[in-house]
Amino acid sequence: MLLEDISQAVGNTPLVGLPRLSPPGYRIYLKLEGENPTGSVKDRVAKYLIEEAERHGQLQPGQRILEPTSGNTGIGLAALCRVKGYPLTCVMPENTSEERRQLLTMFGADLVYSPASEGSNGSVRLARELAAADPEVYMPFQYGNPANALAHYETTAPEIIADLPDVAAFVAGLGTGGTVTGAGKRLKRWNPEIKIFAAEPEYGDLVYGLRNLDEGYVPEVLDLDVLDSRIKVNSLKALTMTRRLADEEGIFAGVSTGASLVVAVRVCARLPEGSSVVALSPDGGWKYLSTGAYAPGDVEEIAQRISGTLWA
Amino acid sequence: MPTVRIPTVLRKHTGGEGQVSAEGTTVGEVFDALVTAHPDLEEQLFEDGRLRGFVNVFVEDEDIRFIDGLDSPVGADDEISIMPAVAGGMA
C-alpha cells in the first residue's frame, strides 16, 4: 500500500472476528479503528471536518482551527493540520490524560484548558466563547457538524458492508453520536433490517460536571431515530470486557471498546441464531495506560479507583 | 421494590441519597412515587408532564425511549437509572 501522505492512510481498517468472546451461535466482529494513522476512529472525522470545510470555502489556507475535544479528534486534527498547514487550538478539560497532552503538543497544537469541574460540556462552552470572540478562527465543531456523521456514512459503513454483507447488527459508543448516526444510516440503507445499537458509557462525575440538568447537552449530530436501542454500560463492565479482550482475543483496546462489546454480547439474544454483529473499537489502549486501567490487580478495585479519570 | 439511581447533580433533592426505592410497575408509576417522596425532583425531571430532554432514563441499562417511554414495564427487582445527557467523554 503506497500512499503520498498521512491523510491518505485514514480508514480501510481491519474487521476482526472474536470467536472466544462471541456467544455460542453468533459471530461478533470488531472494527479496529485504532489502526488509523493517529490511532483512533477520529482520524476519519478529522479528515472530513477539514476537507469538507475546504470544499465549501469555509477554511482558508493557513487559517487557525479551534475545536473542543477531550482527545482523539484533537489528535487526528493535529496530525492533519500539520501536513495541511493549519495552526490548531484544542480546548480540553484540564484533567485529560498526559498521553493526550503530549501527543497534541508534539503535533504542534496549542492547548487551552477548561475547568475539570465543568466536564466535557465545559470545553464545548469555552470553545464556543473563544470562537465567537475571534473571527479569524474556524471551528469545525464535531458535535454539530454533519461532516462528522458523513465520514462514517461514506467510509466506515461501506467498509463494513464490503467485508461482511450479511451483518445483522452494528454497535458503537456514543460520544458525539457521529458514528452511530452516519454508519447507522448507511447500513440501514443497505439493509433496513440491520439493527443499530448505541453503547452509552456511564461516565464518572467529572465528565458530567453539571450543576443542574438544564446544563445537559445533546449533540446536534446525534439522530436518535436511527437507533434501535441505547444501552448503558458502567465502568466495571466496560473495563472487565476490555481486559478480557486482551486476555482472550489478543486485542489491546481502549475502554470504550469494552463498553460496545458488552452491548454486542447482550443484543445477540435478540437476533436470529447465526447472526453476525459488528462492534466498533474506537481506539487502542495505549493512550490510557497512565490511567491504571490495565494495571495488574482486582478489576473491581481498579474500576472504582479510576472511575473519575477513565472516561475524562 | 424497584430502585432508582439518582445522579450526583440531583442528590440535593433526595437528601443526598444516591439510590431510592419506590413502588410501581411502570417507570411512570415509580417516578410518581419518587416525586411524592421527594417533591423537589418533579420540576427537575418533568416539564408539562413529560420527561425533560436532557434526562436519560434506563431500566436495567436500556433507554426507555426505545422501550415504551414512561409506560415501560419495571420488575420488582429492576434498577432504574436517571442520567444527565452530556457531550461524550472521549470525543
Image (cartoon, coloured by chain):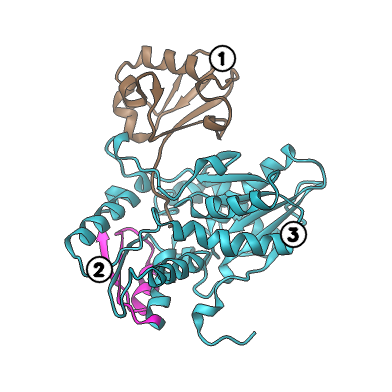
Chain colours: A cyan, B brown
Q: Which residue is mark 2?
A: A137
Give the alpha-carbon distance from disc 1 to disc 2, as whole Å: 53 Å
Residue at coordinates 54% horizontally, 40% vertically from top-left? A225
Specify start and end residues of the magenta stretch as a single range. A84-113
> Which chain does the numbered disc 3 sit on?
A
Q: Quadrant of the N terminus of chain A?
A: bottom right
Q: Position of residue A148 (x, y in %)?
A: 46, 59
Relative to residue A245, is residue B53 depicted above or below? above
Pointer 3: residues within 10 angstroms few (<14), some, or many (20+)? some
Residues beneath discs 1 and 3 located on the same chain: no
* In the displayed structure image, the side of residue A193 where residue A142 appears, left or right: left
Q: Chain of mark 2?
A: A
Residue B25 badge: 1
Vertically, is A311 above or below A105? above
Give the SS element for disc 3: loop
Residue type pointed to by label 2: Val
Residue type, label 1: Thr
Identified by mark 3, the residue type is: Leu
